Image: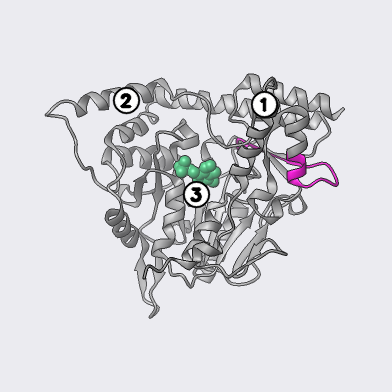
Amino acid sequence: MIRINDNYLNLQDSYLFSTIAKKVAAYTKENPDKKVIKLGIGDVTRPLAKEVILSMHKAVDEMGEKDTFRGYGPEQGYDFLREKIVEYDFKSRGVDILPEEIFVSDGAKSDSGNIGDILSVDNKVAITDPVYPVYLDTNVMAGRSGKYNKDTNKYENIVYIPTTAENNFVPELPKEKVDIIYLCLPNNPTGTTLKKDELKKWVDYAKENKSIILFDAAYEKFIQNKDVPHSIYEIDGAKEVAIEFRSFSKTAGFTGVRCAYTVVPNELFGYDKDGNKVQLNKLWNRRHSTKTNGVSYIVQRAAESIYSEEGQKQIMENIRYYMENAKIIKEGLKEAGYTVFGGENSPYVWLKVPDGLTSWEFFDKLLNEVNVVGTPGSGFGPSGEGYFRLTAFGTKENTIEAIDRIKKWSK
Ligand code: PLP
């Protein structure tokens, strides 16, 4: 008899993006003459940088020659890429990371979801709320949560740490002891960041409680303020308590190309059932080399190209383009009388929906009355209710038009 993983039955269907898609499709069908502008899903719109394309072409040509053809590569990633990552993403910020601590993969989604493979199901998990939904769902799948409670919109046995306007989006340390802590900074969806002293509190907490911080820095390249750390390893001692996820998706427009990496420092240890220390780098290496054959040579060459002088220039142009959109959204909404957050160190603007409306009611009004699509905050967790996310990943023309419509509508 085939027994299933019952934990999957405990998952709440994530209706978020499929519900959005259905509502937009229904509206468009009924109103074919209306131009709907989508500032909802966090996917990029700028094409890949020229340097990336050149490197990919070159790598494709190499694959067609018998002397330069490559088959399976190292599961953890090619040295040429791991060495560039070490130098440009870490050494340049005063952080010493070794190539062997870098694991190249197809995405920060898979890595942040799969990391639980090497951690016991008995660990107590804390997530900030609202946040990227993958952390919660993958822990439900693994059986680390209790049952879902309809009334609270929360799972038992998961510690939700609210980040809202009331606490200025700065998460408070959990009152109870937790073992696994997810931090997503800059945050999706709120767009907020933590300064070094604020992040240090989490590192200290993790050290004191023998906890691990799973630090998702997928939006690191969007940080503009000089005093915001780009990596958790900029905090002393973080290598003993944190794993960091990075992605080329938003950094370099790789959402469709697929490339990311995870840093598992050698100093980071977990404990077995007898309390013996076990190096997590070894476990992740074992897991990674058993379950994947890595990322294609062509894609890794493409990723490597963003670290060249020209590559950096080109990807930063795209980042500036999106950050200009974020400014347009943020300033425009403020002028229209909205209370807005984020958008300064991240491509997401997080707004408070007008009084008396839920996130979904605001979604419907915005779609039906101004034909603009965003994402209801409640889709990111219970504390997202009453908020709404707009992304800066659209085209500049569409962003300007969408914000103009909202401004006129709100008068
Ligand atoms: N982490 C966060 C916080 C995200 O918002 C996203 C995508 O939206 C990802 C990870 C996914 O990254 P990747 O495309 O590398 O899987």
- Which amino acid is tagged 2? Ser
Establish if 164 lies above or below 86. Answer: below
Direction from residue 285 to residue 123 in the image, left or right? right
Q: Quick one: 173 or 331, which is closer to the camera? A: 331
Badge 2 is on which residue? Answer: 55
Q: Residue at x 46, y 23 (%)?
A: 314
Looking at the picture, does residue 142 appear above or below residue 301?
below
Q: Quadrant of residue 49?
A: top left
Mark 1, Cα crowd under 10 Å, few <14 / some 14-19 / many 20+, is some
Label 1–label 3 contact, CB within 8 A:
no
Mark 1 or 3, closer to the camera: 1
**Sequence-first tag of 2 and 1:** 1
- Magenta span contains residue 154: no
The residue sitting at 84% across, 33% down in the picture is 337
In the rendered image, residue 357 lying in the magenta stretch gets the answer: yes
- Whole-number angstrom distance, CA of label 2 to CA of label 3: 31 Å
Q: Which residue is mark 1?
A: 36
